[in-house]
Image (cartoon, rainbow, N blue to C red):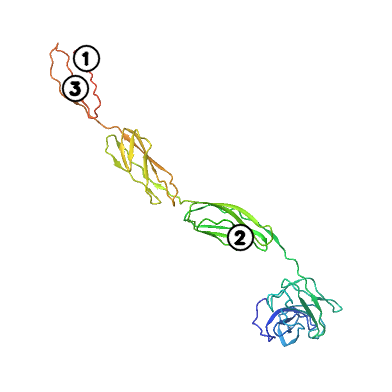
Amino acid sequence: DGTFQPPVLVSLGSAPSSIASSHFYGDVKPDLVIANAFASSITIVRNETSMPGALVTLGGTPQSAPANTAYPIALSASVRDAANNPLSGRVVTFVAPSSGASGTFAGGIQGAHAVSDASGVATAPTFTANGTSGAFSVLAGVASFTTTFMLTTEAAVTQTPTFTSGPPPNGFLNGPYSYLLTAVGAPAPTFSMVASAPPPGLALNGTSGLISGTPTTVGTFAGTLRAANGILPDATQNFAITIAATAQTISFLPLSGTTFGAPPFGISATASSGLTVSFASLTVLACTVSGSSVTIVAAGTCTIEASQAGNATFAPAPTVSQSFVVAQAGQSITFSALGNQTLGAAPFAVIATAPSGLPVSFSSLTRARSRW
């Protein structure tokens, strides 16, 4: 019904290592065949389902026979069948190659196939076992005959490495950095830097290609990246990673207008770096700056610029300017009262002063009655 059923435990030989399915009892129902590596045997478990295509039911006593090869590590079963004759199908067992293996029971057969023709002669297409030449055996009947074939090793697909990622980007001091190098090739390439090193604080993972870390030094660091997989030529890519100082900004609030004659006053601004901000007047005819103190020189517009030059950690901050209007100062004239005069009196001087010290001008408002 398309659902998994409770597991069925079947007693097999020691170290069952491979399983396949074929017809062994002439009833058109797929049975199971298992290679027992340590027991050097194979076991067939009959499918006792009630009808073809129905739920597989394992039952009966498993049939075992020597594998004719020591320590079979994989197998393949043919579709040839003989009615009611256990083990009458063709079973091909595979062993580790006699040389070049990494161990006594190294690996298994991938994609192994063996086909029995009508006359019972076993034939086998080319395939690979453990990446080198070895042998496999064919068992027909209980243990009727053994035929040995040499396995040929297919040439591995290889490809020279090629970078598929661009040069690494720039970064910022004390800021997180992460960039993944990628390259194609067969086998898969690994990565390295040729006669160079990444910016201090960064590291290259040669397997994954990830360059990551936190840069600790400002500057430009150039070199060559290499992707290699043993298939020459290696792929190379030049790089130049510039680590910039940490950016900073200045907060300089608008300044209020004032009047000429006002006493010097202080100003302030802050940098996001916490470094001291410097000030300068861009309109020295109207105002001057000493430290953080502004002195008004004349009426007009005063413009003050705030700056922060940076250091080994922080980049120079963008300058910020603030302007304000200096209004003219008010003044009054001191003009003492004049005494009466007699017609014909000699000319006499009049005197008046202004607090600004500027000269005072005089004019008569009664010219018709006066003589000068």
Where residue 358 appears, as percent x and y from the top left, is 25, 26
Crowdedness near tag 3: few (<14), some (14–19) or many (≥20) residues, C-alpha within 10 Å: few
Where residue 315 appears, as percent x and y from the top left, is 45, 48
| Residue beneath disc 3 | 351
| Residue beneath disc 1 | 367
User: Does residue 329 appear to the left or right of 43 in the view shown?
Assistant: left
Local secondary structure at mark 1: helix
Tell which circle, 1 or 3, labels the residue nearer the N-terminal end: 3
Tell which circle, 2 or 1, labels the residue nearer the N-terminal end: 2
Residue at the far bottom in the pictured view: 61
Front residue of this view, candidates 52 and 364:
364
Q: CA distance from mark 2 to mark 1?
A: 103 Å
User: Does residue 128 appear to the left or right of 325 in the view shown?
Assistant: right
Give the amino acid type for the residue marked by disc 3 in the picture.
Answer: Ile
Q: Which mark is residue 191?
A: 2
Front residue of this view, candidates 315 and 4:
315
Q: Residue at x 17, y 16 (%)?
A: 348
Mark 1 touches mark 3? (CB < 8 Å):
no
Q: CA distance from mark 3 to mark 2?
A: 94 Å
Decide if residue 21 is in sight here.
yes
Give the amino acid type for the residue marked by disc 1 in the picture.
Answer: Arg
Q: Nearer the viewer, mark 2 or mark 1?
A: 2
User: Does residue 243 appear to the left or right of 274 in the view shown?
Assistant: right
Residue at the far top in the pictured view: 344
Q: Residue at x 59, y 60 (%)?
A: 209
Tell which circle, 3 or 2, labels the residue nearer the N-terminal end: 2
